[in-house]
């Protein structure tokens, strides 16, 4: 029955092209909105009269809404029909985009961003399921390559697009540009997307309300801890401690509930599939590297090198284009029977090269042109990672399992990104203090070289017309600024080094995974037992 249902969802010709474009449009809507807002936060803060912690909730609320709904998408599609649920999600996302642009206060904006995240969470996972099921099994790798274009390019497009809008227009336009795309996507969804019929919807009495509540409590609490932990000083904050304990207990009871319930909201039993288990873990690592590196490059170039948001975002564009170029090539290699685990291992090796390259070239005065080939390597690495991981995850799933599997990998990629950004932010802060203390300890006032450097700076200020005492104060301040900048550079170097080592350590484990062998095996692209 599942095979017949799956075959009935396969599309051909122009209809498949339109469905693919619709799904990519929706995926891009969701992903671009994850990163486009970052560069507009200072403008929002000014116009809405918000504090820095308050405006941070614009990002946090969206992420929480997103990660709560992702695991439920397969069940909601089943309850209301995929086409109806998908269209409703696009409509909710589009309406909330309009409301976000019209928000008059910070908490009003935060509330609409949460609802926008609820609508957006469905778009990414359901888009992947729709594209996967629209292609025949032997072309699934190419389908994942097409879907991957949106997922990889989206986070890269956000910062430069947001920077351009903020520089030339007003921040509400960041949300308004979603409206025409959302209207077109809704019309295309209602006209062309079909709903599978592999399950009957449950009556309201059979709905796993306890599972829904436990899921929302668990992932909502966890996402809050990850997003706000560093700013709230982690476990020195009573709120963080309470929510961390809530996430642990909620997770325990959620897993127990879903494994014993007759009609679970999240079908955990699908994780019996070996391919999906490995793919879920790899999706977490991919999210850690993808969102972590997307976060750290603009942060470094803006805070240390002084680039604008637009200039910083533009640095990432060649890498995104490289990934786009790689996608169909990787899809073809998979179709020819190249084992996914070898391509993933190659991607991890390239990602290590990218990270080690970053570790070697960073200085307080590194020019933006020095990042070009390093970021090209990142683009190649992400191309080698994304498609084989998604192909491996979904390759042996059928029917309803595909949506459930896509939800798991999507959620883990999102959580991997949250863990990555939280870990990098915390690590940067701690390492910055370590390096600063170390550098200051070497600034001995009795050291002739230190005094010579200080006097040179002092003479420079005196040449500009400052009196001796004031010039000396400014010299000390300038030297302190140099120490701060050098400590920041050393901290970023550490992040690149350890990020690279993480991927390097994963390579031998990846090569031990059993996978498909030879060209003849077209249906099961990655048997893992």
Image (cartoon, helix red, strand yellow):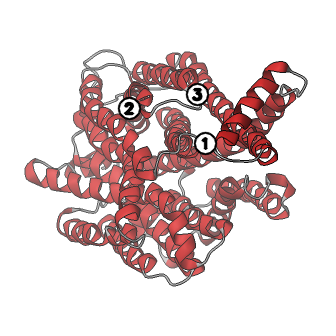
The crowding category of the residue bearing disc 2, from other C-alpha atoms within 10 Å (few below 14, some 14 to 19, many at least 20), is: many
Real-space Cα separation, disc 2 to disc 3, in angstroms: 22 Å
Asked if residue 386 can be seen in this view, the reply is yes
Q: Secondary structure at mark 3?
A: loop
The crowding category of the residue bearing disc 1, from other C-alpha atoms within 10 Å (few below 14, some 14 to 19, many at least 20), is: many
Q: Is residue 78 above or below residue 328?
A: below
Please name the residue that numbered disc 3 is placed on. Answer: 363
Q: Nearer the viewer, residue 513 or 18?
A: 18
Question: What residue sits 30% from the left and 25% below the top?
Answer: 334
Q: Disc number at residue 379?
A: 2
Q: Is residue 382 above or below residue 27?
A: above
The answer to which quarter of the image holds residue 198 is bottom left
Q: Are marks 2 and 3 in contact (CB under 8 Å)?
A: no
Sequence-wise first label, 3 or 1: 3
Residue found at the far bottom of this picture: 104
Sequence-wise first label, 2 or 3: 3
Asked if residue 205 can be seen in this view, the reply is no
Q: Is residue 257 above or below residue 395?
A: below
Real-space Cα separation, disc 2 to disc 1, in angstroms: 18 Å
Q: Secondary structure at mark 2?
A: helix
Q: Secondary structure at mark 1?
A: helix
């Amino acid at each position: 029955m599942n095979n017949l249902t799956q075959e009935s969802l396969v599309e051909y010709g122009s209809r498949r092209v339109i469905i693919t474009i619709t799904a990519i449009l929706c995926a891009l809507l969701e992903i671009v909105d994850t990163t486009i807002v970052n560069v507009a936060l200072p403008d929002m803060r000014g116009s809405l009269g918000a504090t820095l912690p308050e405006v941070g909730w614009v990002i946090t609320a969206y992420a929480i809404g997103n990660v709560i709904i992702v695991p439920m998408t397969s069940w909601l599609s089943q309850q209301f029909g995929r086409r109806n649920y998908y269209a409703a999600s696009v409509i909710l996302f589009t309406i909330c985009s309009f409301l976000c642009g019209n928000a008059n206060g910070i908490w009003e904006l935060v509330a609409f961003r949460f609802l926008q995240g609820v609508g957006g969470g469905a778009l990414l996972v359901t888009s992947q399921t729709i594209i996967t099921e629209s292609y025949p099994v032997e072309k699934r790798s190419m389908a994942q390559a097409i879907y991957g274009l949106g997922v990889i390019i989206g986070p890269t497009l956000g910062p430069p697009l947001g920077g351009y809008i903020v520089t030339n227009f007003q921040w509400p336009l960041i949300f308004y540009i979603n409206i025409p795309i959302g209207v077109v996507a809704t019309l295309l969804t209602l006209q062309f997307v079909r709903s599978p019929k592999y399950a009957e919807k449950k009556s309201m009495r059979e709905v796993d309300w306890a599972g829904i509540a436990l899921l929302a409590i668990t992932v909502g609490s966890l996402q809050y801890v990850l997003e706000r932990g560093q700013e709230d000083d982690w476990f020195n904050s009573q709120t963080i401690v309470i929510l961390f304990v809530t996430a642990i207990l909620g997770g325990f009871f959620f897993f127990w509930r879903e494994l014993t319930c007759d009609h679970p909201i999240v079908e955990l039993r699908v994780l019996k599939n070996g391919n999906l288990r490995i793919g879920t873990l790899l999706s977490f690592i991919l999210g850690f590297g993808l969102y972590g590196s997307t976060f750290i490059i603009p942060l470094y170039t803006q805070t240390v090198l002084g680039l604008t948001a637009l200039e910083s975002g533009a640095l990432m564009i060649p890498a995104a284009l490289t990934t786009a170029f790689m996608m169909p090539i990787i899809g073809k290699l998979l179709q020819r029977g190249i084992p996914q685990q070898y391509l993933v291992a190659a991607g991890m090796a390239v990602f290590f090269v990218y990270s080690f390259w970053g570790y070697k070239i960073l200085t307080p005065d590194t020019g933006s042109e020095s990042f070009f080939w390093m970021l090209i390597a990142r683009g190649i690495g992400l191309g080698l990672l994304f498609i084989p991981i998604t192909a491996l995850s979904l390759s042996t799933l059928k029917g309803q399992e595909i949506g459930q599997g896509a939800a798991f990998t999507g959620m883990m990629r999102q959580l991997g990104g949250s863990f990555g950004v939280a870990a990098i932010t915390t690590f940067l802060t701690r390492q910055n203090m370590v390096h600063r203390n170390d550098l200051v300890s070497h600034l001995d006032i009795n050291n002739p070289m230190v005094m010579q450097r200080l006097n040179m700076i002092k003479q420079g200020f005196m040449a500009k017309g400052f009196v001796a005492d004031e010039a000396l104060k400014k010299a000390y301040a300038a030297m302190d600024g140099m120490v701060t900048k050098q400590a920041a550079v050393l901290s970023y170097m550490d992040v690149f080094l350890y990020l690279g080592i993480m991927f390097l350590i994963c390579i031998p484990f990846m090569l031990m995974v059993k996978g498909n062998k030879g060209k003849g095996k077209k249906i099961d692209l990655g048997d893992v037992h």
